[in-house]
Amino acid sequence: FSFLQERLRYILVLVLLLHSTDSFYVPGVAPINFHRNDPVEIKAVKLTSSRTQLPYEYYSLPFCQPSKITYKAENLGEVLRGDRIVNTPFQVSMNVEKKCEVLCNLPNKPVTLNVEQSKLIAERIREDYYVHLIADNLPVATRLEFYSNREEEEKKKEKDVQFEHGYRLGFMDGNKFYLHNHLSFILYYHREDVEESQEHTYRVVRFEVVPQSIKLEDLKADEKSMCTLPEATGSAPQEIDPTKENQLLFTYSVHWEESDIKWASRWDTYLTMSDVQIHWFSIINSVVVVFFLSGILSMIIIRTLRKDIANYNKEDDIEDTMEESGWKLVHGDVFRPPQYPMILSSLLGSGIQLFCMILIVIFVAMLGMLSPSSRGALMTTACFLFMFMGVFGGFFAGRLYRTLKGHRWKKGAFCTATLYPGVVFGICFVLNCFIWGKHSSGAVPFPTMVALLCMWFGISLPLVYLGYYFGFRKQPYDNPVRTNQIPRQIPEQRWYMNKFVGILMAGILPFGAMFIELFFIFSAIWENQFYYLFGFLFLVFIILVVSCSQISIVMVYFQLCAEDYRWWWRTFLVSGGSAFYVLIYAVFYFVNKLDIVEFIPSLLYFGYTALMVLSFWLLTGTIGFYAAYMFVRKIYAAVKID
């Protein structure tokens, strides 16, 4: 009876716990409730530009500063993205309007920018920099209204509204520079339902800004730091002359509006920002095409194989078939270990590590746990997962190395743990030196770099060794046929069996399956957009795995029919053929979509693109290799060999 009582108590506690967590919102953080007059803190994140790709921290420019500057403690992802979240002197209270207030300095003492500061601001305006602020973890957005290409009658009625991240630092007119020195904040709140006796609580659901440039003389300010804005028609903008000192006032106004948007869907505005409507049709189209081609390939290869195997297994006319057919002839050499087995198994181990990491990240993000509201979470998760997936990478690499008759497992494990991560770290370190030279907040600070190295050698390396040890001790993969002592001579190959032709042919199908998605990913990385289509990405990832596997099987089948048994390295290279197309697409994107002109931004773009292409090649190469290996073992197990 006491046992039953104990059980009931546990169930009751569990029900209470579940009841208390029903208001918890998985993506991001718990909501903050404000009462009227509560301070709503406005923080600055960074300055960004898609023209230079170099983020800078907010106070790198001579903006008004609070009496004490405090930076928010940041996670790994935020640091790697170049976010430096810092407090600002804007005084905003919940549901309290402000007509116009001077931000710093008294009205009779305007801010004076010296020549150097003026030059810096003018340069940042020329480079098309945007300022990013946040209120209650919501990024600021600028509303853009324009008429769509509809019929004339409809034009008058309806404007299309889009939002742009952050606000422009300033604008150019001819050769003159103008700074946005007045910010009109428009904050939207949602009134929460409370009991009658309680005070109303509010939640911030949208944060917009209308930046304006207003000349010092036109801002009429009094001793209490209050100011009056001029009429829109008669005011002149605040020019910044880079050749001399400039005087100006930084001012702001606050306007609150009630909104029907619930707190849980407050990010929807930001996620529908990009001007590219999601090409549902294109994505579905690529899915259908890939499945159609996959179906055809599968049918052809299964029918051909069945015919081959039936012919090979006919005892009576075995001599005739031996004359005409290809892949059975190389049965004594097909499992002959390739050159450099250690490097091959190490690269495949890293490929497995990447595969597991990407699969888990996309799946978790698809469930909404890595939404854009939890800043830097995606990158932090990816880094840690890559480290921990070292166990699987090591295990598969160790087992394959043993199968390929390797003996030096310790060296193999070290190679697996350091080859790919070492290349990544090397490229990132060189690029980081250039970013350091530009004093950008995108440069990874030295302590973070040391922390990453500690994670690599303290978490990833031991885990790879552990996995490698167990993989190497495990029974090697069972090859169905024995390898001959003397290698068979390979006949001269046709031109289309060339490696490079194979890469070009094999890359088309997987690339075609995912290139629409690639556009969104590139926009997210290079144009400061949010990427949120993880459900689609998961679907595209599955299609990529299927198409890579099939194309790899087809290529290895043709190769063995041509009596060329050196398939190990070739399959790995050819299966990663879509990475070559990704590289071409990246060059196309650079030329057509980005207006990067300087050397360092171009170097950063191509440096990071090289890393993406390398990682993508490892990923697709590994998928293709394992598919081909399973296929080869299957077909040679199905034929009778004397």
Image: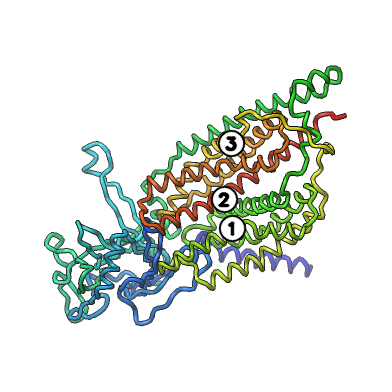
User: Contact, CB < 8 Å: mark 2 with mark 1?
Assistant: yes
Would you say residue 543 is visible in this rendering?
Answer: yes
Q: Earlier in the sequence, mark 3 or mark 2?
A: 3
Q: Answer with mark 3 or mark 1, whichever residue precedes in sequence.
A: 1
Look at 75% across and 54% down and name the residue there: 398
Q: Say above or below: 510 vs 357.
A: above
Residue at the (71%, 33%) spot, across then down: 564
Identify the element where label 3 is drawn.
Answer: helix
Q: Secondary structure at mark 2?
A: helix
Q: Residue type at mark 3? A: Ala
10 Å neighbourhood of mark 3: few (<14), some, or many (≥20)?
many
* Alpha carbons under labels 3 and 2: distance apart: 17 Å
Q: Nearer the viewer, residue 198 or 455?
A: 455
Q: CA distance from mark 3 to mark 1?
A: 26 Å
What amino acid is found at the position of numbered circle 1 in the picture?
A: Val
Return the residue at label 1.
423
432, 209: nearer the viewer: 432
- For residue 491, what is the image quadrant? top right
Q: Earlier in the sequence, mark 2 or mark 1?
A: 1
* Residues at marks 2 and 1, CA–CA distance in whole angstroms: 10 Å
Q: Nearer the viewer, residue 59 or 273?
A: 59
Residue 426 falls left or right of residue 104: right
Task: Give the total of numbered labels.
Answer: 3
86 or 498, which is in the foreground? 498
Hey, which quadrant is residue 179 in on the image? Answer: bottom left
